[in-house]
Image (spheres, coloured by chain):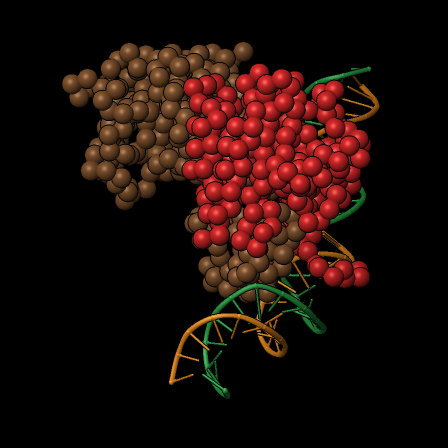
Chain colours: A red, B brown, C orange, D green
DNA sequence: AAAGGCGTTCGGCAATGTCGAACCGATCTG
DNA sequence: CAGATCGGTTCGACATTGCCGAACGCCTTT
């Protein structure tokens, strides 16, 4: 076979594809299903699955024989958080931001066309919330995502239409979104007004590395009644978010 | 080469070994370091690493060329939580337990000789805590771990001495530990009194699947002053924990 | 009772990935 | 400032590795 430039190891890439498929839905998948989805013989997949089970990346349902993700991945994921410099440097600032604003604080990075949440502080005095670390947010319908898109050096390639609508206020028109992103660039912060969930708004600002590249975003998210007045965001909250973003940026430069 | 019984795919297993090594410490590792640790040629490892980078499981430091875990693993780890039945079924009960006891609530499973934390609810009115989901607790020095060891069908093989000591009250003597586990089995719940962290105690009880096998443990953890009186655990807290464990067990049977 | 679905096993063939030596830049070091 | 050493990376030849497809046994469905 003709050799492409960046050779990769077939079986490892296939193993990764299996894991991605298993992660894409809450359902367990069988060998036959995976074989159809990937266009590979059942026997081939079985071999890879057997290995993935052995190393704990995948678990097999004893009753049905189907496969699901394994517990080792949870541990690897949490190990990633320990290594991630952006996260370790910004934890304290996120706590402070949540404390000052009395809203939940969020930190995210751009990853495969989504916003990957790498830190999340619950709203003070409201413990009954589920943690969102590791989940994806849509780039075009979240304040964090707008910041990351606006400052993305690779341009808009990630925002391929059609953009899904989550509420009737979601920006689904590429031109409208681009307009919004332009505003984000001039103002230096982003807003999201009930574009992802009815009744909730969010504010975010960019975190930059020592060379000035945007490597992440930090923001808050809360009920529209608390964060806005007369239909507009209360600027006090915006300043809290921007202060936190600048503080982390300064911290990364040391 | 002679074929072992359960054939596995070499390159996938090696890739997993690399990931485990990268997760074992906060340090980034280079190709040469990995080659020494695994006893493989540099070239071989480079090929696997290139593939792991391509699929996002590993990231390469632009400055030093060294490797660290990648963001895709964080997402896979959080996907695991969505699939995990024990966790989804017990979230509400853990919230209730934290609410009643006003302490942090924890759920864990046995995994590779450690307690893997699969859910964690912060102590009410105390948001400045870091989330521990995905981290390991020692089996012999945590209440969750003692429960899981006491009811582990595979016996004590996992508790290989020497047991590390975290405080001067940690049970490092295998005989003493076995005595404690026997008490856990007769009482139906476990305690841990400043054996992991000075000033903190914990209580845990077993969660069973429909066939009666222990598949996890739930418990609370808090300051010794709040949970004990005259050096002994306040039984009210024990009943909270056992109630929650029974409720989840009942829930799993449906 | 037959049919179709599933996960699993197996052996032959060649494509695949392994290996080791060579490469190149950066960083120590005398 | 040159030499040495260490780092990550590339490359091509070899044969081992792991792919493939057909066959198996089990289960549920018709």
Q: Is residue B143 above or below residue B112?
A: above
- Where residue A40 appears, as percent x and y from the top left, is 76, 42
Residue name at image x 70 percent, y 44 percent: A44
Q: Foreground: D3 or B44?
A: D3
Residue A236 can be seen in this image: yes
- Where residue B150 appears, as percent x and y from the top left, is 34, 27
- Left or right: A182 with respect to B157? right
Residue farthest along the left direction in this orientation: B230
Residue name at image x 78 percent, y 41 percent: A39
Residue B175 can be seen in this image: no
Q: Is residue A83 above or below residue B35?
A: above
Q: Foreground: B141 or B57?
A: B57
- Where residue B18 appears, as percent x and y from the top left, is 52, 52
The image quarter containing residue A227 is top right
- Left or right: B199 with respect to B65? left
Q: How many marks?
A: 0
- Where residue B100 appears, as percent x and y from the top left, is 37, 12
Locate the C terminus of chain B by quadrant.
top right
Residue name at image x 21 percent, y 34 percent: B169
Q: Foreground: A28 or A198?
A: A198
Residue name at image x 26 percent, y 19 percent: B227
Locate the N terminus of chain B by quadrant.
bottom right
The image quarter containing residue A34 is top right
Q: Foreground: B210 or B241?
A: B241
């Amino acid at each position: 076979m003709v050799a492409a430039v960046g050779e990769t190891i077939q079986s490892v890439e296939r193993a990764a594809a299996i894991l991605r498929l298993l992660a894409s839905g809450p359902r367990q998948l069988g060998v036959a299903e995976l074989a159809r989805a990937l266009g590979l013989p059942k026997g081939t997949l079985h071999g890879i699955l057997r290995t993935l089970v052995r190393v704990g990346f995948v678990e097999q349902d004893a009753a049905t024989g189907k496969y699901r993700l394994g517990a080792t991945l949870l541990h690897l994921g949490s190990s990633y958080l320990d290594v991630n410099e952006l996260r370790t440097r910004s934890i304290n600032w996120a706590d402070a931001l949540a404390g000052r604003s009395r809203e939940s604080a969020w930190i995210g990075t751009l990853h495969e066309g989504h916003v990957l949440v790498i830190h999340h502080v619950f709203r003070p005095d409201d413990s009954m919330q589920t943690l969102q670390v590791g989940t994806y947010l849509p780039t075009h319908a979240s304040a964090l995502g707008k910041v990351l898109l606006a400052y993305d050096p690779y341009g808009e390639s990630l925002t391929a239409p059609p953009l899904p609508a989550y509420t009737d206020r979601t920006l689904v028109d590429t031109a409208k979104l681009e307009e919004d992103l332009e505003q984000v660039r001039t103002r230096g912060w982003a807003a999201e007004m009930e574009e992802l969930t009815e009744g909730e708004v969010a504010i975010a600002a960019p975190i930059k590395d020592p060379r000035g590249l945007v490597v992440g975003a930090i923001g808050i998210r809360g009920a529209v009644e608390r964060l806005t007045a007369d239909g507009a965001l209360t600027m006090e909250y915006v300043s809290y978010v921007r202060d936190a973003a600048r503080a982390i940026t300064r911290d990364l430069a040391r």
